Image (cartoon, rainbow, N blue to C red):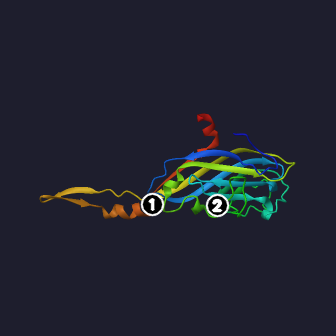
Amino acid sequence: MINVPIPDGTGAAATTNLTIAGVPANATITEIKVNMNINHTWVGDVDVNLRAPNLAILNLVGGLDGGTGGNATDNFTNTAFSSLGGSTISGFAAPRTGTFAAEARAGFGPTGFIQTVNTWAGLVPPATPLAANGQWTLAAGDFAGGDVGTITNWSISVDYTTPAVVPRYFLMHGHHWQVYIPILLLQPLIQEPTCQRYMQHQQYRQLIQ
């Protein structure tokens, strides 16, 4: 657990960082997912944005509901945002437990963390999977006084696949070495590429800091 207070009514950013490492250059990113827990007594006050290692910023939540800031209910509890999409968070019942699409509202976000891209691909372009490695920042800002909130937990995961490695056999043929790739092995390896997942949790980072 963490305890990051969100400055009340100022729009100033409350930030917390996690690091992803080990995504290889030949990876194909299949999903980026953020899970967060924020206690707040008027969630409409709060914008929440995600900044990638390449400094691109995506809006996850902006002025619930519909950008108006009128949602007076409490808390984000196990609220997840996925690059694969999900439910619409605007108007969703408190405490918004589930998987949602990022709102991607232009102009929304805490001071210094206004949205700069409107898709997840802007955070990690498909052609540069190495961009997933590095420091990710969750930033929350409160834009109306009187109700307060705190970031208590968050995590980020990057799922990806890599091309399968097909075994090669070197056999002597006459005076030459020849390379043989078993046909029976080739097809299933192509159909079922290896899959790895890297996840860092805020609780773990607290232990190693």
Pointer 1 and pointer 2: residues touching (CB < 8 Å)? no
Within 10 Å of disc 1 (Cα), the crowding (few <14, some 14-19, many 20+) is: few
Relative horizontal placement of residue 112, taking residue 32 as reference (left or right): right
Residue 208 vertical placement versus 69 (above, below): above
Amino acid type, label 2: Thr
Foreground: disc 1 or disc 2: 2
Number of callouts:
2
Q: Which residue appears at 44% of the width and 64% of the height?
A: 191
Relative horizontal placement of residue 67, taking residue 158 as reference (left or right): right
To which quarter of the image does residue 108 belong? bottom right
Q: Which residue appears at 50% of the width and 57% of the height?
A: 129
Residue, far front: 112
| Residue 3 placement (x, y as % from top left) | 73, 40
Give the CA distance from mark 1 to mark 2.
36 Å
Q: Earlier in the sequence, mark 1 or mark 2?
A: 2
According to the picture, the residue beneath numbered tag 1 turns out to be: 192
According to the picture, the residue beneath numbered tag 2 turns out to be: 116
Residue, far left: 175
Relative horizontal placement of residue 1, taking residue 166 as reference (left or right): right
Query: For numbered disc 1, what is the local secondary structure?
Result: loop
Q: Which residue appears at 52% of the width and 59% of the height?
A: 29
Query: For numbered disc 2, what is the local secondary structure?
Result: loop
Residue 209 bears which disc, if any? none
Quadrant location of the C terminus?
Answer: top right
Q: Nearer the viewer, residue 180 or 124?
A: 124
| Residue 175 placement (x, y as % from top left) | 12, 58
Quadrant location of the N terminus?
Answer: top right
To which quarter of the image does residue 61 belong? bottom right
Within 10 Å of disc 2 (Cα), the crowding (few <14, some 14-19, many 20+) is: many
Amino acid type, label 1: Glu
Q: Nearer the viewer, residue 123 or 85?
A: 123
| Residue 162 placement (x, y as % from top left) | 45, 57
